[in-house]
Image (cartoon, rainbow, N blue to C red):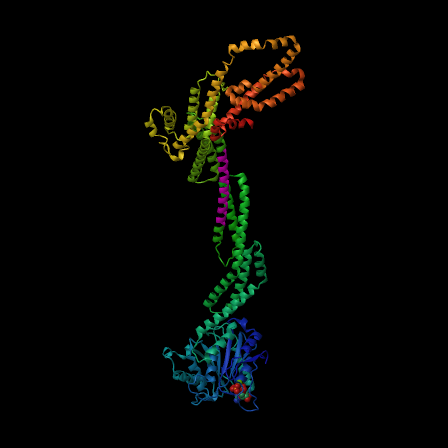
C-alpha cells in the first residue's frame, strides 16, 4: 500500500469531530505547507459496494475493507481521512460511511445527509459508487443518495463547483457509451425533481457539478482487469487541479493550512443545521488563520534575540543604524507572514497584515521614542557646548544662527538614521521640542549676556556721573544745573553709543534696542537724581559748612581775627545768602531746561521777609513757603519742598547764630583789651610802694638772676598757651581753655628744659601756627557737627560748649 499508511478517523459514527486526530494527520503529512496546491477527493455510495476497496487500489490508501470471506456488513463508520500516495498534487482522500439505500425523508439531521453535505463542502471531486445493474432502475440504491446530494447542495451558498465522478462497478458487457446517456438521464431527472429555492429554479446542473462517468470491472471476478482499469483511472488524478484536469474549474479553495480549522467549522455549522455560507466561511477561515499566523509571527519577533538586544541597548544610548536594524527585523516578520498567509483571501490577509504591522510598530515604538529622546538630548548638549565656544569667536546672533542650523541639521541626520521604513513616523514634535529647548537656552544666555552688558555700561555711566555730579552740586551756583545737564548729556551719549554698538551683535529688533537704550538713558538720569536726593538730604550740613567757611575765613581763605574793624552784619548776610543759594539749587532737580522761581521765592520769603518782617505783617500772612510743592515744579522733581526749606532755614539760622554771637563777643573783647593800661594813680602807688623792693634787687644780683629765670619760664608758658589767642573769644572760654592746657604745657616745657638745658628758651615760632590751626579746627567742628540743642544749651552752659575741645 506504499505511503498510504497514515489513516485517521475524522468523524466517528456519532458525528464527533476528531480535532487531535486531524491536527496529527496534518502535521505528519505536512499538509499545511501545500498552500492551494492540494485536492480533496471523497467517495459516497451504498454500503459494502467496494468503496474502501476502490480507494485503497486507486490511491494506495489503507482504509478498512470488509473481509470478503465474512459476509457483507457495514465496515466503515463515520468519515476517514488518508493521504493519497504518489499523486501530484497532494491529494486528501476521504472514505465515507456507506448509505443504507433507504429513503429517510427530509430529516436534515440524519448523519447520512450531514456527511454528504460535509463531503460536498470540502471536496473537489466526489466519487459516486454505484452498481452497474442499478442504472436505469427505478428502485436503484443510489437514487436516494443522489437526491440527498442535490438537496444538500441547495444549502450551500455559492457552492464550489464539484466534480461528480460516477464509478460504475461490476460493469457488464454493455459498453459505457450506451450506459452513460441512460445514467445522465437518471441524474437529470433527479436534479429536476429536487425542490429548489426560487433563485435556483432555472439553474442547470452543470452550474454546480461536472459530471464524469467511469465503469470498472468487478474486483472479485475480474481482478486483473479491475486493476488495469483502476490504474488508468488513477492517471486522471494526476494534476487534477490543473486547468482541464478532473477538478480544473473548482472554486473557493481553502488554503491547506486552514484545512483543519475549515473542516471543523463546516462540521459545526452542519451539526447546528445551519445553512453553510461558503464565501463567508472562507473569509472566516482566512480571518482566523491570518490572525493566528500574525500572532505567531508577532510573538516570534518579540522574543527575537536581535530585537531584545537592540531594545536593551537603546535604553542606554544612541544605537547607530537603529532604523535599518528595526526595519530589517520588521521586514523579516512581515515576510514570514506573507509567505504563510499568501493563499488566504486577499482582503483579509491585507487587513491582518496591516494589523500585524501596527502591532509590530507598537512593539518598537517605545524604543524609537527613547532613541529620539537620546538624539534630542545629545544634540542639545552638543549645541550648548558648541555655542559656548562659538561665542568666544563670534557675535551672539551669528553664533546662535550657525550653531542652531548645524544642530538642527545634525538632528535631522540622526532622525534619518533612526527612521523605521514601515512606520513613516514624523519626528517633527521632538524636533520642535529641540528647537524650543535651543531657543530657551539662547534666550537665557542672551538675557544673561545682556544684563552683563547693561550692568557694565550702567557701571561706567555711574562712575562717570556720580562723583562729578556730587562735586557740581557741592559747588552750588547758578551754573550748577546747566553743568549737570551738559555732563549728563555728554556721558549718556557716549555710553549709549557704546551700548548700541555692543547690542548690534545680538541682532535684536529695533524696538527692543531702543527700549534698552532709553533704559540706559533713564539710568543716567536716575544716577543724577539719586545723587541730588542724597545731597539734598545733607543740605543743612552743606549750608552750615558754606556759612562757616565764608564767615570764619576772609576772601583769601585765611581765618578771620575779629579785631573790631570787620562788618559782621555784612559778612553774615553774604554768608547766609550763599547758603540760601545752596538751598535753592538743592531744592529741585532741574534736568530739563525749564526755569523756576525757587530762588526768588526763597529770597523773598526768607531773606527779605525776615528783614522787613517786623514792619510788614501782611506779607507774612501770605507765606509763599507754606506749601508742599513749588510752583511750576512737578513733585517728582522736588527735592526739598517749600515747607522743608522754611524749616531748614530756621534750623540753619538757629545753629549758625551762635557763631555770629561769638564773633561779636570776640570783637568787643578785643576792643576792651586795647584799653587795658592801669590808671595813673596806680602807677604812682607802684613806684612809691615798690621802691625798697627795687633797691633790694639792685643790691643783690642773685635776685636779679632768679627773676630773669622766672621771667623766661613765664614767657615760655605765655607763648605755648597762646594766652592772647585764648582770650580772643572772651574771658570765660579763655580761662577754660587755659585750664585744660596749663599742666601739659608746663610739663612739656620742664621736659624740654631738662633735655636741652641751655636751649630752654627755644624759638616759639614753629608751634604757634600749629596751635592756631588746631584752635580753628576746633571752632569749625563745634559749629558744624554739634546738634542744634547742644549748641543752644552751650550758650547757657559754658562747660557743655567746651566738651569738643576736651575730647
Ligand atoms: N462484486 C464485487 N464485489 C466487490 C468488488 N470490490 C469489492 N468487493 C467486495 O465487496 C465487499 C465489501 O467491500 P468494501 O470495500 O469493504 O465495501 P464498502 O463499500 O467499503 O463497505 P462499507 O464501508 O461497509 O460500506 C468485500 O467483500 C469486497 O471483496 C467489486 O468490484 N465487485
Ligand atoms: Mg468502506
Query: Is residue 654 in view?
Result: yes
Q: In what quadrant of the picture does the N terminus appear? A: bottom right
- 613 and 4: which one is in front? 613
Labels in figure, total: 0
* Whole-percent x, y for residue 301 in the image: 55, 64
- 304 and 628: which one is in front? 628
Q: Is residue 791 magenta?
A: no
Tell me the quarter of the picture where residue 647 sits. top left
Q: In what quadrant of the picture does the C terminus appear? A: top right
Prevailing secondary structure class for the magenta stretch in the rendered image = helix
* Whole-percent x, y for residue 556 in the image: 49, 18
Tell me the quarter of the picture where residue 333 sits. bottom right
The residue at the far left in this view is 618
Q: Is residue 419 above or below residue 668?
A: below
- 378 and 68: which one is in front? 378
Q: Is residue 688 left or right of residue 182?
A: right
Tell me the quarter of the picture where residue 591 sits. top left
* Whole-percent x, y for residue 518 in the image: 43, 36
Query: Is residue 163 in view?
Result: no
Per the rendered image, the range of residues in magenta is 434-460
* Whole-percent x, y for residue 162 in the image: 46, 77
Q: Which residue appears at 48% of the width and 41% of the height?
A: 397
Q: Is residue 459 magenta?
A: yes
- 396 and 588: which one is in front? 588
Amino acid at each position: 500500500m506504499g505511503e498510504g499508511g497514515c489513516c485517521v478517523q475524522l468523524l466517528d459514527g456519532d458525528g464527533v469531530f476528531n480535532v487531535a486526530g486531524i491536527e496529527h494527520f496534518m502535521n505528519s503529512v505536512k499538509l499545511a505547507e501545500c498552500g492551494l496546491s492540494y485536492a480533496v477527493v471523497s467517495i459516497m455510495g451504498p454500503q459494502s459496494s467496494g468503496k474502501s476497496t476502490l480507494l485503497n487500489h486507486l490511491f494506495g490508501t489503507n482504509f478498512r475493507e470488509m473481509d470478503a470471506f465474512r459476509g457483507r456488513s457495514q465496515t466503515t463508520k463515520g468519515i476517514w481521512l488518508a493521504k493519497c500516495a504518489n499523486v501530484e498534487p497532494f491529494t486528501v482522500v476521504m472514505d465515507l460511511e456507506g448509505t443504507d439505500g433507504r429513503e429517510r425523508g427530509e430529516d436534515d439531521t440524519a448523519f447520512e445527509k450531514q456527511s454528504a453535505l460535509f463531503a460536498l463542502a470540502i471536496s473537489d471531486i466526489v466519487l459516486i459508487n454505484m452498481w452497474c445493474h442499478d442504472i436505469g432502475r427505478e428502485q436503484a440504491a443510489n437514487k436516494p443518495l443522489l437526491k440527498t446530494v442535490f438537496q444538500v447542495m441547495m444549502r450551500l451558498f455559492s457552492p464550489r463547483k464539484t466534480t461528480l465522478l460516477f464509478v460504475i462497478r461490476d460493469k457488464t458487457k454493455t459498453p459505457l457509451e450506451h450506459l452513460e446517456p441512460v445514467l445522465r438521464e437518471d441524474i437529470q431527472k433527479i436534479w429536476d425533481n429536487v425542490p429548489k429555492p426560487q433563485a435556483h429554479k432555472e439553474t442547470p446542473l452543470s452550474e454546480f457539478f461536472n459530471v464524469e462517468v467511469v465503469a470498472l470491472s468487478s474486483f472479485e471476478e475480474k481482478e486483473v482487469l479491475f486493476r488495469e482499469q483502476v490504474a488508468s483511472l488513477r492517471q486522471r488524478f494526476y494534476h487534477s487541479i490543473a486547468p482541464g484536469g478532473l477538478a480544473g474549474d473548482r472554486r473557493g479553495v481553502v488554503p491547506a493550512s486552514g484545512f483543519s480549522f475549515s473542516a471543523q467549522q463546516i462540521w459545526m455549522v452542519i451539526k447546528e443545521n445551519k445553512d453553510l455560507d461558503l464565501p463567508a466561511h472562507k473569509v472566516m477561515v482566512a480571518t482566523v488563520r491570518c490572525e493566528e499566523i500574525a500572532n505567531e509571527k508577532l510573538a516570534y519577533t518579540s522574543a527575537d534575540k536581535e530585537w531584545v538586544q537592540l531594545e536593551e541597548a537603546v535604553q542606554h544610548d544612541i544605537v547607530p543604524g537603529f532604523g535599518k536594524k528595526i526595519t530589517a527585523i520588521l521586514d523579516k516578520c512581515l515576510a514570514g507572514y506573507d509567505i504563510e498567509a499568501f493563499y488566504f483571501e486577499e482582503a483579509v490577509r491585507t487587513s491582518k497584515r496591516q494589523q500585524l504591522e501596527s502591532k509590530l510598530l507598537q512593539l518598537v515604538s517605545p524604543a524609537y521614542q527613547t532613541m529620539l529622546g537620546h538624539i534630542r538630548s545629545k544634540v542639545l548638549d552638543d549645541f550648548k557646548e558648541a555655542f559656548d565656544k562659538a561665542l568666544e569667536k563670534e557675535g551672539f546672533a551669528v553664533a546662535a544662527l550657525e550653531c542652531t542650523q548645524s544642530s538642527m541639521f545634525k538632528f535631522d541626520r540622526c532622525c534619518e538614521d533612526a527612521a523605521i521604513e514601515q512606520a513613516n513616523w514624523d519626528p517633527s514634535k521632538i524636533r520642535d521640542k529641540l528647537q524650543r529647548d535651543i531657543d530657551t537656552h539662547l534666550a537665557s544666555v542672551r538675557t544673561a549676556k545682556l544684563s552683563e552688558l547693561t550692568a557694565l555700561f550702567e557701571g561706567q555711566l555711574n562712575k562717570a556721573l556720580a562723583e562729578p555730579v556730587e562735586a557740581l552740586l557741592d559747588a552750588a551756583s547758578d551754573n550748577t544745573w546747566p553743568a549737570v545737564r551738559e555732563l549728563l548729556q555728554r556721558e549718556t551719549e557716549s555710553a549709549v553709543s557704546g551700548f548700541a554698538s555692543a547690542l548690534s551683535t545680538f541682532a535684536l529688533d529695533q524696538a527692543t534696542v531702543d527700549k534698552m537704550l532709553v533704559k540706559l538713558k533713564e539710568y543716567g538720569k536716575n544716577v543724577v537724581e539719586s545723587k541730588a536726593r542724597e545731597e539734598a538730604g545733607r543740605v543743612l550740613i552743606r549750608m552750615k559748612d558754606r556759612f562757616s567757611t565764608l564767615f570764619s575765613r576772609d576772601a583769601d581763605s585765611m581765618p578771620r581775627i575779629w579785631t573790631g574793624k570787620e562788618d559782621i552784619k555784612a559778612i553774615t548776610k553774604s554768608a547766609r545768602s550763599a547758603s540760601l543759594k545752596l538751598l535753592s539749587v538743592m531744592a529741585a532737580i532741574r534736568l530739563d531746561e525749564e526755569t523756576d522761581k525757587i530762588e526768588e521765592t526763597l529770597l523773598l520769603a526768607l531773606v527779605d521777609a525776615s528783614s522787613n518782617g517786623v514792619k510788614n505783617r501782611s506779607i507774612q500772612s501770605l507765606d509763599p513757603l507754606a506749601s508742599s510743592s513749588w510752583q511750576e515744579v512737578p513733585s517728582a522733581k522736588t527735592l526739598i519742598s517749600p515747607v522743608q526749606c522754611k524749616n531748614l532755614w530756621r534750623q540753619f539760622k538757629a545753629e549758625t547764630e551762635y557763631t555770629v554771637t561769638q564773633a561779636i563777643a570776640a570783637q568787643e573783647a578785643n576792643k576792651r583789651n586795647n584799653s587795658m593800661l592801669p590808671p595813673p594813680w596806680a602807677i604812682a602807688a607802684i613806684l612809691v610802694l615798690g621802691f625798697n623792693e627795687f633797691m633790694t634787687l639792685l643790691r643783690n644780683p642773685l635776685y636779679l638772676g632768679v627773676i630773669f629765670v622766672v621771667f623766661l619760664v613765664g614767657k615760655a608758658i605765655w607763648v605755648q598757651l597762646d594766652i592772647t589767642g585764648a582770650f580772643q573769644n572772651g574771658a570765660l572760654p579763655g580761662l577754660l581753655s587755659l585750664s585744660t592746657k596749663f599742666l601739659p604745657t608746663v610739663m612739656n616745657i620742664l621736659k624740654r628744659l631738662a633735655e636741652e638745658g641751655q636751649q630752654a628758651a627755644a624759638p616759639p615760632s614753629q608751634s604757634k601756627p600749629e596751635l592756631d590751626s588746631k584752635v580753628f579746627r576746633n571752632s569749625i567742628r563745634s559749629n558744624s557737627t554739634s546738634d542744634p540743642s547742644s549748641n543752644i544749651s552751650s550758650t547757657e552752659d559754658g562747660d557743655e560748649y567746651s566738651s569738643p575741645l576736651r575730647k
